[in-house]
Image: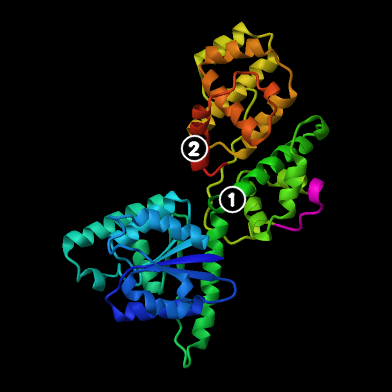
């Protein structure tokens, strides 16, 4: 587990010593720790994690000059899975949060009492308001997890950011228990931190999935949908050999992420069924037993019998093309798919249902295109079906409309990517 600790310049000796103690306790075989800090603190932190694991910005104001590019370079060099921002230094911490969110990397924020009343009282009112308002917006927007150091600080953060943190439980506590030699506290804190990081990674599986992971999930989703429906997989073109070879080199951690994301998307049974047909028994895994923050998982069914929203166009099309049953069912599915996509409630389950119908049902392509045009969803249908060609290996001969342009397809992909679907 690779953790990048972003530590701003601190004039407080107590805070700096706390950070040094924390980093020392985090140095376990389960955690690979890297530090991004100010040049003035480089030597201190190098003593904890090693010189080769400490990075510095070239500018004292990275949010103004070249900071984003350097941050991306450090993240790539360390293969960071979590960004842990220590303390709070206005623009430094806020920009790190923004950059991490843009790169889809989970963020942990440790305020170290910087939001407590006795600390805020020493800050000028304009700066105090700015810090509170901006941090509230960022916590809500980026979904960062707040790690407090005491129950008192926990209550304070709940009070200040109850709307930003919502009901997702993104508030963890790692208190420090004083002991005579410090060993008990170090071991306990290290264990607590590993549990916190594990929970954050498990709560954001899609953010940390590689292109290889997505490719494997797409292939397993397509194969699983075919097998679960009782269709003959031998009649469908799927790159099974390539998927099998990728699975052979897949680590247990990445397979765990694929299963968690598949569970969120309501396709885990199909994915595991496809895995078993290619590689044998996948091993026991119950996502309900995994400790995670609250995950919003939609279970919207892709209906065929009636559209989710009433539309006069659909009523007219149903009357004009009443003899075309298969075409009407596909039109209803595509109309409902558009509604789910517009409301950001579409799931991989919905895409699998559409894939099966488009691949195995017979319909008149010319009549279907006219019907979709009358409904005003021809362009959307072209994009979503072209997406199935690229993601679930739907053969082009089974796409009843003209394939979408690359530019239009990118818009659809970005929309589904932001919704953590694919």
Q: Secondary structure at mark 1?
A: loop
Q: How is the image coloured?
A: rainbow
Nearest the viewer among 19 and 322 is 19
Q: Which residue is mark 1?
A: 210
Q: Do the residues bearing badges 2 and 1 touch, measured as CB atoms within 8 Å?
A: no
**Quadrant in the picture for residue 346:** top right
Q: Which segment did they paint magenta?
A: 276-285
Nearest the viewer among 251 and 330 is 251
Q: Secondary structure at mark 2?
A: helix
Tell me the residue at 50%/61% (across/down).
77
User: Disc number at residue 414?
Assistant: 2
Looking at the picture, how far across and down is residue 34, in whole percent?
47, 69
Furthest-bottom residue in this view:
180
Tell me the residue at 58%/51% (across/down).
209
Q: Earlier in the sequence, mark 2 or mark 1?
A: 1
CA distance separating discs 2 and 1: 16 Å
């Amino acid at each position: 587990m690779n953790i990048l600790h972003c530590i701003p310049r601190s004039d407080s000796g107590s805070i700096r010593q706390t950070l040094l103690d924390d980093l020392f306790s985090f140095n376990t075989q389960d955690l690979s720790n890297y530090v991004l800090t100010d040049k003035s603190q480089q030597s201190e932190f190098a003593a904890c994690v090693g010189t080769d694991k400490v990075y510095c910005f070239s500018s004292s104001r990275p949010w103004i000059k070249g900071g984003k590019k350097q941050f991306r370079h450090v993240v790539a060099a360390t293969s960071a899975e979590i960004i842990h921002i220590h303390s709070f230094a206005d623009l430094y911490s806020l920009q790190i949060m923004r950059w991490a969110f843009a790169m889809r990397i989970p963020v942990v924020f440790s305020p170290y009492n910087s939001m407590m009343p006795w600390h805020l009282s020493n800050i000028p009112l304009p700066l105090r308001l700015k810090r509170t308002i901006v941090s509230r917006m960022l916590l809500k927007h980026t979904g960062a997890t707040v790690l407090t150091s005491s129950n008192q600080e926990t209550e304070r953060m709940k009070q200040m950011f109850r709307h930003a943190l919502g009901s997702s439980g993104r508030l963890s506590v790692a208190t420090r228990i004083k002991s005579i030699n410090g060993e008990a506290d170090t071991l306990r804190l290290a264990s607590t931190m590993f549990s916190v990081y594990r929970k954050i990674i498990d709560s954001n599986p899609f953010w940390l999935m590689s292109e290889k992971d997505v490719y494997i999930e797409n292939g397993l989703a397509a194969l699983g949908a075919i097998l679960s429906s009782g269709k003959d997989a031998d009649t469908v073109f799927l790159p099974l050999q390539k998927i099998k070879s990728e699975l052979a080199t897949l680590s247990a951690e990445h397979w765990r992420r694929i299963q968690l994301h598949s569970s969120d998307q309501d396709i885990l049974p199909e994915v595991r069924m496809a895995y078993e047909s290619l590689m044998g028994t996948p091993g026991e895994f119950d996502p309900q037993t995994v400790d995670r923050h609250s995950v919003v998982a939609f279970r919207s069914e892709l209906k065929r019998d009636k559209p989710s929203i009433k539309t006069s166009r659909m009523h007219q099309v149903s009357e004009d093309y009443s003899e075309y049953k298969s075409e009407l069912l596909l039109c209803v599915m595509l109309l409902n798919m558009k509604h789910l996509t517009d409301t950001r409630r579409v799931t991989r389950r919905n895409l699998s249902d559409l894939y099966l119908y488009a691949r195995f049902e017979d319909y008149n392509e010319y009549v279907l295109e006219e019907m979709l045009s009358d409904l005003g969803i021809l362009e959307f249908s072209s994009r979503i079906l072209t997406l199935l060609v690229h993601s679930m290996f739907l053969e082009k001969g089974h796409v009843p409309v003209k394939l979408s342009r690359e530019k239009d397809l990118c818009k659809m992909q970005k929309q589904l990517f932001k919704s953590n679907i694919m």
